[in-house]
Amino acid sequence: MREKLPQQYWLRINSLLVAFGQAICRPVAPHCDACPISEHCPQLGVIPRKRPKASRIEARSMPTGRHFISWNVNGLRAALSKGFLDVVNSLNADIIALQEIKLQIDQLPKEILELKGYQQFWHPAEKKGYAGTAVLSRNAPLQVYYGVGSSDIDREGRVLTLEFEDYFLINTYFPNAQPGLKRLDFKQAFNQALLEYMNRLRQEKTVLLCGDLNVAHKEIDLARPKENRMNPGFSDEERAWMDTLLAAGYVDTFRTFCPDPGQYTWWSYRSNARERNIGWRIDYFVVDAAGSGRVQDAAIHSDIFGSDHCPVSIRFI
């Protein structure tokens, strides 16, 4: 394709092909029933998806409420080269919360700065090429809060809060406990500070927490729990904090709608983990119990590529 098309056309055509691949010809359970070239495809080495029941399709085709997306992009500039803008356009979300943007504000690409339809809020880490969060919102918030009031935490750009008339949206990139759990103490301090912050805010209005929590809560939330016991993201201490969070009156929205195993949001780049669906569910939308009735649906978009994580979403009224 590079030989046949001028570069300006190749970039556009390539992004369209990427978007097609994300939506239809995915590595796991490809949507052959919806593919316009299925009759010409040998379908080698794949098992097409099972067509969902009609009632499920009808329910998904008429969603209600505002559409909120959370996505760890593992480097925004890298995601841009993998069809990020096409994904944004196809999702048509009201809010897009991003984690691990890995850039400074003066490094924002022109394509992002010129993105129409969204107000942009950025909270990069002080350290270049590391962590950071951002929110794209169609509606202007009342206030924006950067961090939780702790310099040790806030310098890493891990918490970005938008206040709206009747809810707070907290976009969060939790620390990784690191091999040997060498950063577990920092993560536990982060967890405690964040929960105290959430509890203060929910006294005023509904609190929505979204982001990469860097923990699989239950054994159902990762493909190989026995092999990963006490590894970062599945240590007893990290899982216990998830118990504490839910016991404090918060709800894991995805598990409200889907109790099924095999639902993951992160896959290692090694050993074809994503193609084999050897993954972890570590990306969440969490809501306080009083506001849980406002969440109309929750989903994992495992058919969207561009990062080692996939987006997660809710419908919120």
Image: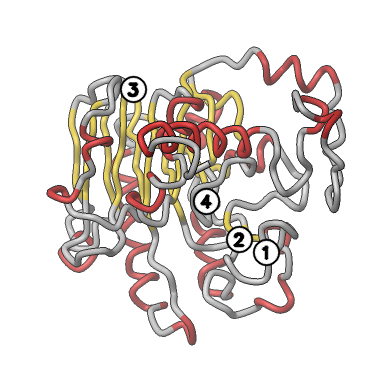
Q: Which amino acid does label 2 sit on?
A: Trp
Give the labeled residue for mark 4: 283
The spot of residue 179 in percent (x, y) is 48, 83
Q: How far apart are marks 3 and 1 (CA)?
A: 40 Å
What secondary structure is marked by label 1?
loop
Give the labeled residue for mark 2: 267
Q: Nearer the viewer, residue 24 or 217?
A: 24
Q: Nearer the viewer, residue 269 or 59?
A: 269
Q: Which amino acid does label 3 sit on?
A: Asp
Q: Which of marks 4 and 3 is in front?
A: 4
**Cβ–Cβ under 8 Å for marks 4 and 3:** no
Q: How far apart are marks 3 and 2 (CA)?
A: 35 Å
Q: Which amino acid does label 4 sit on?
A: Asp
* 10 Å crowding of disc 4: few (<14), some (14-19), many (20+): many
Q: Nearer the viewer, mark 3 or mark 2?
A: 2
What secondary structure is marked by label 2?
strand
* 10 Å crowding of disc 1: few (<14), some (14-19), many (20+): some
**Is tag 4's residue or tag 1's residue first in the polypeptide sequence?**
1
Question: Which residue is the extreme one toward the front?
Answer: 4
